[in-house]
Amino acid sequence: MRRRAYLLIQNKIASGELKAGTLISEAALAKELGSSRTPIREAAGQLLAEGLLELSPGGGIIVTQLTRQAIRDLYELREALEVFAVGRVAQDGIRSPDRERLNHILGETQTLVKELKSSGEAELNMQQMKRFTLSDLSFHTLLIRLAANARILKVVNETRLMIRIFAIRRKGHKREDLDRIHRHHKEIFQAVLEQDVERSRRLLAEHIQASARERLDEFDMWERENQLAGLDTIEPFRV
């Protein structure tokens, strides 16, 4: 029951149903789960430790608030772990079935590029973005799995979940975004196949750093828009 409560809250956060700053209602969640408040309280404690929830000034528990430093910290952690993992994979080499799986994942992104080009649309729609997100996650997750370190995989998965929760982007990727990401993935894959450890590590680090800059730029734009919206609500000075 505690595990079900944990997944219930986590899924509500990941889907955006529980947004940043939302107060967690033990009573409502317990009713939905069909349990007492105890599993909800225990699950919330675990999510507090993992950083998805935080204590509010009023004493309740809320979904973690978005901060610029939090985004930076998460990307730095992700870079450190993923770069280590890809170096190990490049050093050890990968088997033919795993090469085929990575090739298939790369093909998914290329398919989305073709769909966008043929449709004439400027950016991916919601359904296409879901497919892209799954493809992107699969590429990075498979590389980490091949490093055979379960702890790294667990931490990176949690980190990526928090990054997704902190996502500000509301629109789909444009064609140039897809082309860039596909090119990065292809170059990383090629370096791994050639067992070029240093190049694999460098390319993946650059790829994650580019993603971090994009997310931080989105945050800065979101913050400016919020500040302007706040100014619009201020009463004009009257003499």
Image (cartoon, rainbow, N blue to C red):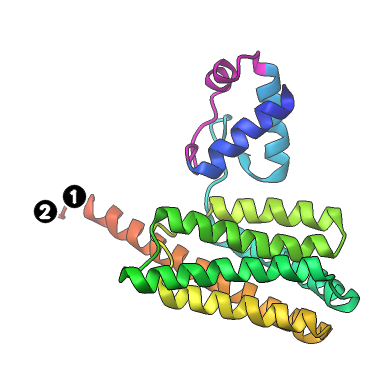
Amino acid at the residue labelled 1: Glu
Relative to 29, 145 lies left or right = right
Outermost residue, left side: 239
Q: Label 2: state its secondary structure.
A: loop
Q: Do the residues under discs 2 and 1 have CB atoms within 8 angstroms?
A: yes
- In the image, 176 versus 32, the foreground residue is 176
Neighbourhood count class around disc 1 (C-alpha, 10 Å): few under 14, some 14–19, many 20 upward: few
Q: Return the x and y of residue 188 as percentages of the image width and height.
A: 70, 79
Residue bearing mark 1: 235
- Whether residue 19 is in magenta: the answer is yes
Q: Position of residue 233 (x, y in %)?
A: 23, 50
Q: Quadrant of residue 52?
A: top right
Q: Can the viewer see residue 55 in this picture?
A: no
- 52 or 57, nearer to the observer: 52
Q: Which mark is residue 6?
A: none
Q: As displayed, is residue 234 above or below residue 117?
A: above
Taking 64 as reference, is 67 above or below it? below
Amino acid at pointer 2: Arg
Residue 200: image x %, image y %?
76, 81
Quadrant in which residue 210 is drawn: bottom right
Q: Residue at x 47, y 58 (%)?
A: 129
Find numbered disc 1 in the image and state the secondary structure of the residue it sits on.
loop
In this picture, residue 30 sits left or right of residue 205: left
Circle 2 sits on which residue?
238
Q: Which residues are magenta?
A: 17-37
Crowding at dot 2, Cα within 10 Å, few <14 / some 14-19 / many 20+, comes out as few
Residue for point 68% across, 27% down: 4
